Image (cartoon, rainbow, N blue to C red):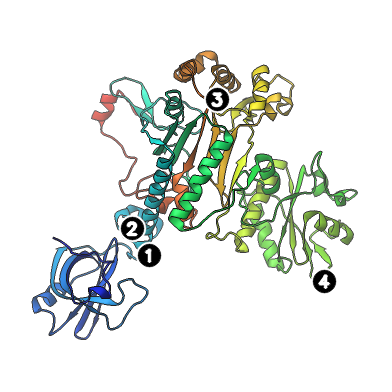
Amino acid sequence: MYRTHNCGELRTANIGETVTLAGWVQYIREKGAMTWIVLRDRYGFTQLMFEEGKTPQDVLDTIKGVGREWVLQTTGKVIERFSKNMELPTGEIEVLADKVVVLNKSAVPPFTIEEETDGGDELRMKYRYLDLRRPTLKRNLELRYKVNRSARNYLDTLGFLDIETPFLIRSTPEGARDFIVPSRMNENQFYALPQSPQTFKQLLMVSGYDRYYQIVKCFRDEDLRADRQPEFSQIDCEMCFVEQEDILQTFEGLFKHIFNDVKGIQMTEAFPRMTFDDAMWHYGNDKPDIRFEMKIQNLKAKNQVHCEALNGVDFKVTNEAESILAIAVPGASEYTRKQTDELTEWVKRPQIGMTGLLFIRCNADGTFKSSVDKFFSEDKLREIAAFSGAQVGDMIFILAGAEARTRKATSELRLEMGNRLGLRNPDVYKPLWVIDFPLFEHDEDENRWVARHHPFTAPKPEQIATMINNDPKIAAGVAFYDHPYNDIKANAYDIVLNGTEIGGGSIRIFQRDLQEKMFAALGMSEEEAKEKFGFLLGAFEYGAPPHGGIAFGFDRLCALLGGQETIRDFIAFPKNNAGRDVMLDAPSAVDDKQLDELKLILKK
């Protein structure tokens, strides 16, 4: 056998035993007649000792010239380590080697295989098989496996069946772009890779498999970010004969089980719930980070309580702004002019898109100082501070402009200040449910409705009649916000963790007439709906039960459990920011024979 033990398991109890180990050379150290080699495998590190006069000469000859990442097999006796390293589980012992076999040599690695490497992202992606040797990535993939196992165990206890669904399906260009796959046997026709198993899991509910799950690969041809990849994994679930409350209770339980099982964190309290409207109003986005307060205050709100201090002030910026939003940043009144200037430039960046930043200092002596003292008296500043919930020692930051842009910018500023003040501790976990989303959004370019989630999401039960009894078309001259559909809420829910959407789902439409109404609202003709989704509409005529479900972003969840926001290092072989696999150099060209078989002609 190649080994009797792995490199992470020997302890003082093994002293005196003869063992055989195999692994990679982590590093080599020499001192006089002594040589030490640290051997590494997936399980840990063990130090080997070689000493002139004690170690056979052929062994000493063998280790001459050995370098990092060489693959060795060694046999020797476990002895007590003279200079102990208590940071390693094996740090109290070492192996006095009397036999060494070089199983394979290694070229000099392009970067160091250590916790903190000197390799950049692209270099490490190119040599991903080397990067995966690093303990950091090993721990990430072990965590991913634990989350996978924990989710499966929990769902199994509740009677869920793991059922596979197809990867080659029909393209339905709603939502993100599909990856398409040409069919050789069906000329000029294409499959699509699934963005999710949505329709299949609904069909499984129609088939009577009332509790389904799958940890499944999904594919979206979209621009990438730190938490996105062209192929990603999700924990996909569906249940029959359930209402929203059943879904929330079941999968809040899954979430708590995973945290307890994987992280040893017991979440005993029910997750807070927040409506979409409240999330947007207080936090500026629908996935609020509630690890810290710093809520947004609307100083100039239509048909809402607003700040009277703005009245009668001859200041063009606030008078002409559609929206004026403020956040009170704790303890920031001592910020220097350099710091406030830097933040002003920060909000002017194209990614934020504001023209400037107003600020009010709530000084420790009870006075107020602002960047707009010319227009606002100290009494008015005091009134704004009170309206904003500011305390002595705080700094109020104010953004003004168009509603949508200003709200998004204030949300980003809030998160940025949370980062700068250390309020977004990755070891603190604050989940919540966001509920009562709008069912529709308005596409101004095409003057039609689009689904906020997807076209299979049901409206709230009390609003089904509104949807059925009204024409979804927006008449000429009628503002979309005056249309009854603008007020319809979706029977949908997202689970958010630390400002990141971890999962989302909904109660589904299961009646054919309601589903046809939804397709009509999205601008589909009866013929188009039948062509694209006739299989689903047909299934609804054969006793479709009420059903609903949820899908968790598996990669995102693993990353947050690992204390990071980027998902790349929790996927064994990810793509880069351009969607390329730089290790395989994919996507790549194919030869003419393959193109001829597919009857495809590439444009020059």
Amino acid carrying mark 3 in the image = Ile
Q: Is residue 237 at least partly visible in the picture?
A: yes
* Residue picked out by circle 3: 509
x%, y% of residue 580?
A: 38, 44
Mark 3 or mark 4, earlier in chain? 4
Front: mark 1 or 3: 3
Q: Secondary structure at mark 4?
A: loop
x%, y% of residue 527?
A: 51, 13
Q: Secondary structure at mark 2?
A: helix
356 shown above or below 483: below
Mark 1 or mark 4, earlier in chain? 1
Where residue 365 is drawn, which disc sits there?
Answer: 4
Q: Residues within 10 Å of mark 3 (few under 14, many from 20)?
A: many
What's the distance in space between the residues labelled 2 and 3, CA to CA? 46 Å
What's the distance in space between the residues labelled 1 and 4, CA to CA? 49 Å
Q: Residues within 10 Å of mark 4 (few under 14, many from 20)?
A: few
* Residue picked out by circle 1: 117
Residue occupying the point 74% across, 26% down: 482
In this image, 466 relative to 110: left or right?
right
Residue contact at pointers 1 and 4, CB within 8 angstroms: no
Amino acid carrying mark 2 in the image = Asp
Which corner quadrant holds the C terminus? Answer: top left
Q: Secondary structure at mark 1?
A: loop
Amino acid carrying mark 4 in the image = Asp
Mark 1 or mark 3, earlier in chain? 1
Residue occupying the point 35% across, 20% down: 188
Residue contact at pointers 2 and 3, CB within 8 angstroms: no
Front: mark 2 or 3: 3
What's the distance in space between the residues labelled 3 and 4, CA to CA? 60 Å
- The quarter holding residue 405 reads top right
* Residue picked out by circle 2: 131
Mark 2 or mark 1, earlier in chain? 1
